Image (spheres, grey):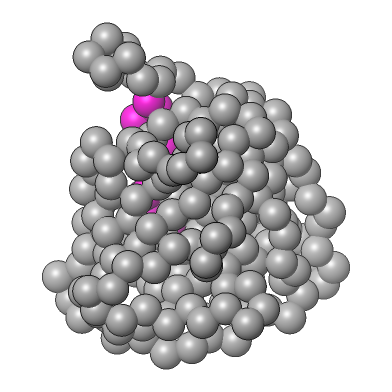
Amino acid sequence: MEVRLEQAAGAGWETVDPGRVLDAGGRVRFRVRANFEGFLYVLNRGTSGAFALLYPRPRDDNRILPGREYPVPASAGHFQITGKPGYETLYWIVSPAPLAPDPDLRAAPLTAEPSAPRPGGPAAPAPPAELLPRCHDEIFRARGECVDVTAGPRAAQFSPRGWQVSAARSHSLDFARHEDFAVISSTAPLTEPVIYEYRLAHR
C-alpha cells in the first residue's frame, strides 16, 4: 500500500513528506494506492486514549481495488489539525473482508484535543503528553522543511478494542519512507485484517 500525505496549499493541495510537522489549523488528506483487494478503515486515537472512526463515513464505499487511487477521506473531504502541539495517532486497518466496527465508535473530526472516555471499560493508554515534534536538522538544512523522522507509518503498538485485528501481525510489515510518500508492504498475502499506525506531527 502506497500512502501519500497531502496538505492544503492555496487553492490546491501539495504532497508532503510523511513526517512533515503540520501547522495547527491546517487541512490534510491522504491518497492511497494498493496492489490488493480489501477494505480500509481509519481510526483516530485522541489524547485520552479514546478512539473515533474517521473513515469510512456513512455512505462511503471503503472497498479498495488493485491499482486504483483513493482519497481518504472520500471525495472532497479533509481532516483539520487542531489542539495542542504533539502527535495524532491514526490507526489504519486493512482487511480482505468487511469488518463490523464497534458500535460505540463515533465519527469525529481529526483533533488532538482530549475526547471523552468510552463507556464499558478503560480506554487505551494515552500517548505521553510531553512529547513534542522535532525538526530533523539535516532535512531542514537540505530542504528547508521541518520533518520529524518519528512521524509517519510504523507498526502498531496495540489493537483498538472492539475490532477483530491483532497488533502482533503489524510487526511483520515492512515500512519504507520516501520524500513524498510511504509504502507499507508484506511478503505474505492479505488473508486476515492487519493494522498499523500513522503518526501525524503538528505544532
Residue 8 vs residue 11, the one in the foreground: 11
**Is the residue 131 above or below the residue 179 in the image?**
above
Residue 43 position by quadrant = bottom right
Residue for point 51% across, 34% down? 10
Q: Residue furthest bottom?
A: 97
On screen, residue 40 versus residue 144, left or right, reads: right
Q: Position of residue 176 (x, y in %)?
A: 21, 48
Residue for point 45% across, 74% down? 40
On screen, residue 32 versus residue 47, left or right, reads: left
- Which quadrant is the C terminus positioned in? top right
Q: Which residues are magenta?
A: 147-156
Q: Is residue 151 magenta?
A: yes
Residue 152 vs residue 35, the one in the foreground: 35
Residue for point 75% across, 41% down? 113
Q: Residue furthest left?
A: 187
Q: Main secondary structure of the magenta part?
A: loop
For the image, the number of numbered tags is 0
- Which quadrant is the N terminus positioned in? bottom left
Answer whether residue 192 is visible to the viewer in this image.
no
**Is the residue 49 above or below the residue 106 in the image?**
above
Q: Position of residue 192 (x, y in %)?
A: 36, 83
Residue 161 vs residue 63, the one in the foreground: 63
Q: Residue furthest front?
A: 11
Q: Position of residue 37 (x, y in %)?
A: 30, 83
Q: Is residue 149 magenta?
A: yes
Answer whether residue 122 is visible to the viewer in this image.
yes
Residue for point 80% across, 63% down? 118
Residue 165 vs residue 199, the one in the foreground: 199
Residue 191 position by quadrant = bottom left
